[in-house]
Amino acid sequence: MFDLGYMVLGRLTEITRGSQIIVVQFEAQSIGLLVDDLHGVPEFSDEHITPTPFARHDGGTLIPQVIRANQGKVLIQVINLDYVYSTLKAGEMPCMPEPVMEEAA
C-alpha cells in the first residue's frame, strides 16, 4: 500500500475506519493506493482537463494534470500511473514510516 497523501504532500494520511484504498493495475502488477478523500468522479471532457504547472513533457511527474470540476471551484488531481510504477521499480519512491491506525473509541 502506498500513501498518496505522503507522496504528494510529504505528510502521512491519517488512517481511520473511513480510510479508502484504490487498487490499480498496471501491466501485470496491482498495488493499493491509500487516499485521504475519495469521491465519485464522472467522466469529464477534455476542456475540463488542464496540465499542472509542474507537468513535464517526458511524463516524469506524479500529477501531470488536474480536472476543473464544479465550474472550476474544485480541482481533481490526475495521477500518472506510469510514473508511480516506474519510480517504484527504480526504488525512487519516498520511504514512509509505518502508518498507525487510530484507536477505536
Image (cartoon, grey):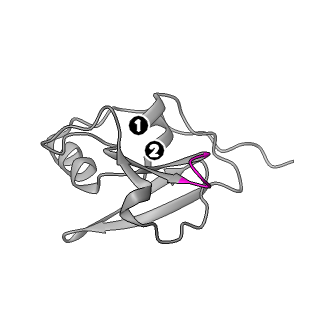
Magenta-colored span: 69-73
Picture coordinates of residue 39 (x, y %)?
61, 61
Depth check, front residue: 8 or 63: 63
Picture residue at 70% right of the left edge, 56% below the top: 18
Badge 1 density bin: few <14, some 14–19, many ≥20, Cα 10 Å? some
Q: Dot 2, how many residues are within 10 Å of its Cα: few (below 14), some (14-19), or many (20+)?
A: many
Of the pair 27 and 103, the residue shown nearer to us? 27
The residue that mark 2 highlights is 4
Query: Residue 10, position in %: x, y?
Result: 46, 28
The three-letter amino acid code for the residue at tag 2 is: Leu
Residue at the spot of label 1:
7
Q: What is the quadrant of residue 52 in the picture?
A: top left
Q: Mark 1: which amino acid? A: Met
Is 80 part of what is drawn in magenta? no
Q: How far apart are marks 2 and 1 (CA)?
A: 5 Å
Label of residue 78 in the image: none
Badge 2 marks a residue whose secondary structure is helix
Magenta stretch, main secondary structure, is loop
Contact between labelled residues 1 and 2, with CB atoms less than 8 Å apart: yes
Whether residue 32 is visible: no
For image coordinates 45% across by 44% down, the residue present is 4
Q: Position of residue 28 (x, y in %)?
A: 20, 71
The residue at the point 47 percent across, 30 percent down is 9
Q: In this view, does 34 lie to the left or right of 91?
A: right
